[in-house]
Image (cartoon, rainbow, N blue to C red):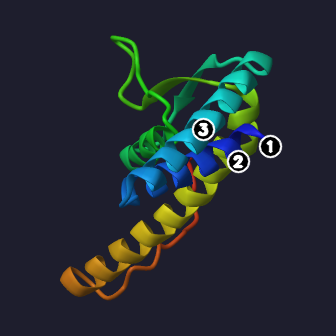
Amino acid sequence: MNEAQLLDKLRKVQALFLGATTDGERAAAQHARDNLQSRLDSLKETDPPIEYRFTMEDQWARTLFVALLRRYGLRPYRYRRQRYTTVMVLVSNQFVDEVLWPQFVKLDNELKGYLNQVTQRVVKKALNSDTSDADVIDEPKRLTC
């Protein structure tokens, strides 16, 4: 089981723990949670976390990325004087390659598509129904000496 699968199972066990109504259910969920956490800790020994620096192109991508990091229990940060678009995190290389980055790219594409649709709709209703791109024309000829 890789780190992503362990984290997913850990989230599900936490949901079970929160929804448990009896002491027995809570104890079983806590035991499963402890087992998963110990396996996750052992994975960190074989693929230790390293410091990554990510640069996001806009505030929406940054917000999405930070939320995704926190979803997996990772702590995003940045150093003083780093740009607002910079996000630092300690994370394993395998987790970034196999889970974090592919998931971020997919979600970011979905978010951009949604934001584009909203923008088109609002501009059409509020300003002008023609939301096509600007015309492309030839440059004026230059005078030569």
Please report the residue visible at 47 percent of the width from the left and 73 percent of the height from the top: 133
Please report the residue visible at 71 percent of the width from the left and 17 percent of the height from the top: 48
Q: Are marks 1 and 2 in contact (CB under 8 Å)?
A: yes
The answer to whether 86 is drawn above or below residue 27 in the figure is above
Looking at the picture, which amino acid does disc 1 mark?
Answer: Met
The answer to whether 12 is drawn above or below residue 94 in the figure is below
Q: Are marks 2 and 3 in contact (CB under 8 Å)?
A: no
Q: Position of residue 6 (x, y in %)?
A: 68, 43
The alpha-carbon separation of the residues under discs 3 and 1 comes to: 73 Å
Query: In the rendering, which numbered label is found on residue 145?
Result: 3
Badge 2: how crowded within 10 Å, few (<14), some, or many (20+)? few
Please report the residue visible at 48 percent of the width from the left and 62 percent of the height from the top: 112
| Mark 3 or mark 1, whichever is nearer to me | 1
The alpha-carbon separation of the residues under discs 2 and 3 comes to: 70 Å
Query: In the rendering, which numbered label is found on residue 5?
Result: 2
Q: Earlier in the sequence, mark 3 or mark 1?
A: 1
Badge 3: how crowded within 10 Å, few (<14), some, or many (20+)? few
The answer to whether 83 is drawn above or below residue 99 in the figure is above
